[in-house]
Image (spheres, rainbow, N blue to C red):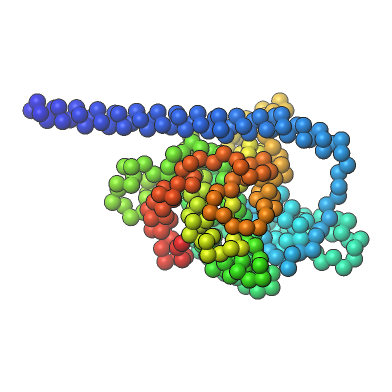
């Protein structure tokens, strides 16, 4: 009897120690996120950005002008009907790309198409007469549905014959919804679409010295997570570990953090497996920063939103979507050339701090083996 009691006590102590270790690690990760993520973003937004705004105000603003499409190339932006995505769609159009706005809401998508087309018509490029205008189109895309990604990929394959797809920006994402939905939208959505398009993208980058860019939009929130799975998860006999994410609200955004870490690890997998064989392919990661977007406002609620707006803190602490898009544009403008090293763009330049876990090959392979492959086997070709 005494022996059983001691074993039970030992087991309880082990579980207690394990739980304590997990809590300590989470606190440590929150400290890392606060110091290496939030603090740096606040410093940039409150001080550095204000200096740049002053310089821009004192300088002469140039009107946008449409450039010729580079060989009639197409850029695809997911989640582009609001916030950063819509600003990227505008910017890509003014750079001469044919733009595909891939999103759920057809009404908002068509409205954005008309808005960009109107701005293109009103731009000063009309004075040059023969400058061809980019084509702006909407295609319905639901990041939480595999078939939607396959349908979009099929439509893009047809379009690719006349205007090759050379830029894919995986921007669609959610925050604060159910844990499982967060993983499906923020991870499996971009993974499915990217893998469905990969054969075409690789063909495009290997002809006529073309450069193809895959840009995955991440977040400093990934610094909160040291892994997508813990050891107990990995010891599970379940084929897919998607079941560890319940259909309950992600109230503390811990699953959001894991989903953004997982997307960075997917980028690591792509660079490691594809880049040595495809010289014109770049897989880049970008973090827009603290940005005043519809996604953020929906998550914090009307009361906090109104308070931040009334006090002027919204404009002080947060970037505008246009400013947030600078990280993605920096990735787009990065010189051609492939590298298996991670390039993480923050505040309009590479070299932002991404966690060691985000480029950990062992963790990235575990993500592929225990979640991506079981969920997508038979749907897309796996790397």
Where residue 300 appears, as percent x and y from the top left, is: 59, 34
Where residue 315 appears, as percent x and y from the top left, is: 72, 32
Q: State the residue lying farthest toward the right.
A: 127
Q: Residue at x 24, y 28 (%)?
A: 13
Q: Between residues 347 and 162, which one lies in front from this camera angle?
A: 347
Q: Residue at x 39, y 44 (%)?
A: 229
Res. 67 visible in picture: yes
Considering only vertical position in the picture, is 40 above or below 356?
above
Left or right: residue 321 versus residue 7 is right
Left or right: residue 137 versus residue 237 is right
The image quadrant of residue 348 is: top right
Left or right: residue 168 versus residue 30 is right
Left or right: residue 196 versus residue 22 is right
Q: Between residues 230 and 362, which one lies in front from this camera angle?
A: 362
Res. 136 visible in picture: no
- Quadrant where the N terminus lies? top left
Where residue 250 appears, as percent x and y from the top left, is: 47, 39
The image quadrant of residue 309 is: top right
Where residue 166 appears, as percent x and y from the top left, is: 65, 63
């Amino acid at each position: 009897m005494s022996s059983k009691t001691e074993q039970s006590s030992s087991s309880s102590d082990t579980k207690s120690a394990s739980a304590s270790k997990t809590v300590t690690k989470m606190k440590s990760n929150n400290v890392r996120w606060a110091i290496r993520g939030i603090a740096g973003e606040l410093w940039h937004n409150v001080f550095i950005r204000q200096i740049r705004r002053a310089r821009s105000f004192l300088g002469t603003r140039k009107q946008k002008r449409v450039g010729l499409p580079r060989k009639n190339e197409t850029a695809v932006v997911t989640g582009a009907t609001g916030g950063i995505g819509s600003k990227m769609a505008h910017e890509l159009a003014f750079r001469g790309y044919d733009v595909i706005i891939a999103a759920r809401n057809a009404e908002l998508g068509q409205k954005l198409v008309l808005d960009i087309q109107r701005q293109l018509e009103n731009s000063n490029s009309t004075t040059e007469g023969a400058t061809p205008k980019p084509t702006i189109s909407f295609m319905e895309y639901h990041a939480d549905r595999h078939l939607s990604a396959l349908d979009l990929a099929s439509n893009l394959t047809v379009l690719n014959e006349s205007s090759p797809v050379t830029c894919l920006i995986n921007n669609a994402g959610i925050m604060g919804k159910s844990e499982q939905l967060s993983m499906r939208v923020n991870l499996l959505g971009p993974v499915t679409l990217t893998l469905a398009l990969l054969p075409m993208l690789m063909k495009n980058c290997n002809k006529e010295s073309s450069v193809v860019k895959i840009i995955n939009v991440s977040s400093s929130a990934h610094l909160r997570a040291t892994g997508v799975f813990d050891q107990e998860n990995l010891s599970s006999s379940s084929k897919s570990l998607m079941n560890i994410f319940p259909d309950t609200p992600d109230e503390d955004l811990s699953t959001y953090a894991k989903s953004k870490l997982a997307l960075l690890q997917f980028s690591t997998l792509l660079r490691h497996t594809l880049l040595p064989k495809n010289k014109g392919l770049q897989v880049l990661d970008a973090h827009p920063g603290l940005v005043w977007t519809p996604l953020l406002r929906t998550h914090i609620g009307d009361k906090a939103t109104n308070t931040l707006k009334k006090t002027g803190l919204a404009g002080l602490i947060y970037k505008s979507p246009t400013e947030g898009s600078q990280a993605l544009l920096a990735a787009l403008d990065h010189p051609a050339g492939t590298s298996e090293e991670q390039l993480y763009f923050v505040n309009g330049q590479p070299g932002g701090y991404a966690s060691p876990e985000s480029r950990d090959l062992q963790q990235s392979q575990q993500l592929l083996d225990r979640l991506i492959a079981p969920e997508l086997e038979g749907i897309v070709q796996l790397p």
